[in-house]
Image (cartoon, helix red, strand yellow):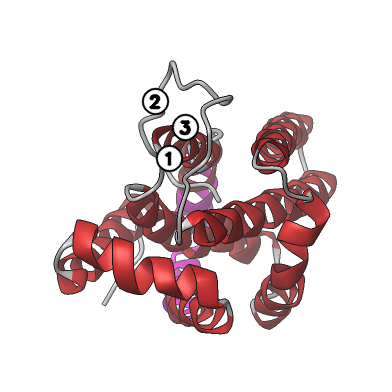
């Protein structure tokens, strides 16, 4: 969860959650993002421990703290919906953990690309879905998907590595393409396994987002822009 997005200020987190058939879908989305934020905290903490310089360790530690702050915001919102945060997150633990197990990076550079490219395309998808939520939940989702400074950090480090050894670019480009396929497949599997979330995507989201093909075209464009920023070939 590291994609750049404009945050929306002034949201009142005490605003009642969405009522009606989509309420369970909203709760599913918040539970999924809460566990993803918690997982991101642990991953960034691990990356900080592996960083070679004190400057990099500090930067990654600060990002980890920001992700834990996102987790706390989502947990509070779930509680305001009179739901148990642990119960809301539990259905997604296996799927999220399996995704990270399938996409375990081989080294620090692959870990950085995974956070920027893999998590980025997933965040783009969830930001699009957030447009159908009630205002308070929507603004919260956009806030927790906001960039914590990771994008600039990753771009700088990857470009530095390519400058030192241009051969790194090909390996990282292949890795990024694999991550995109895994991320999109993961989103589809999660939606298929969770009926409330699937209903929201097939009903409210489909009607309010318009042409789903246009949405995925935008995801592809955003991915190409990220790859270009890294100095990698997206084709």
In front of the other: 35 or 168 = 35
Q: Residue at x 45, y 59 (%)?
A: 22
162 falls in the magenta region: yes
In front of the other: 214 or 209 = 209
Residue 124: image quadrant is: bottom left
User: Where in the figure is residue 63, as x and y percent of width and height?
Assistant: 67, 35
Q: Is residue 136 left or right of residue 100?
A: left
62 is higher (above) or lower (below) than 42: above
147 is higher (above) or lower (below) than 192: above
Could you tell which of marks 2 and 3 lies nearer the N-terminus? 2
User: Where in the figure is residue 122, as x and y percent of width and height?
Assistant: 46, 62
Specify the segment rendered in magenta.
Answer: 156-179
Assign the magenta stretch its main secondary structure: helix
Residue holding disc 3: 136
Q: Are marks 1 and 3 in contact (CB under 8 Å)?
A: yes
User: Visible in this render: residue 194?
Assistant: yes
Q: Residue at x 14, y 69 (%)?
A: 211
User: Where in the figure is residue 212, as x and y percent of width and height?
Assistant: 21, 71
Q: Residues within 10 Å of mark 3 (few under 14, many from 20)?
A: some
Spatial CA span between label 1 and label 2: 9 Å
Q: Residues within 10 Å of mark 2 (few under 14, many from 20)?
A: few
User: Where in the figure is residue 46, as x and y percent of width and height?
Assistant: 82, 52
Residue holding disc 1: 138
Residue holding disc 2: 8
Spatial CA span between label 2 and label 3: 10 Å
């Amino acid at each position: 969860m590291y994609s750049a997005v404009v945050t929306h200020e002034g949201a009142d987190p005490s605003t009642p959650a969405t009522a009606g058939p989509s309420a369970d879908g909203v709760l599913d989305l918040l539970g999924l993002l809460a566990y993803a934020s918690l997982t991101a905290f642990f991953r960034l903490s691990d990356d900080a421990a592996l960083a070679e310089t004190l400057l990099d360790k500090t930067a990654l530690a600060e990002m980890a703290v920001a992700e834990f702050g996102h987790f706390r915001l989502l947990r509070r919102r779930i509680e305001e919906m009179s739901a148990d945060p642990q119960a809301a997150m539990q259905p997604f633990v296996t799927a999220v953990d399996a995704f990270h197990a399938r996409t375990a990076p081989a080294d620090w550079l692959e870990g950085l690309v995974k956070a920027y490219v893999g998590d980025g395309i997933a965040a783009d998808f969830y930001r699009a879905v957030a447009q159908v939520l009630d205002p308070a939940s929507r603004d919260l989702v956009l806030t927790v998907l906001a960039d914590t400074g990771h994008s600039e950090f990753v771009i700088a480090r990857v470009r530095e590595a390519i400058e030192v050894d241009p051969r790194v670019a090909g390996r990282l480009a292949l890795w990024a393409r694999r991550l995109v396929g895994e991320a999109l497949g993961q989103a589809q599997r999660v939606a298929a396994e969770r009926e409330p979330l699937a209903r929201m995507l097939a009903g409210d989201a489909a009607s309010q987002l318009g042409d789903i093909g246009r949405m995925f075209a935008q995801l592809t464009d955003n991915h190409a822009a990220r790859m270009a920023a890294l100095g990698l070939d997206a084709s």
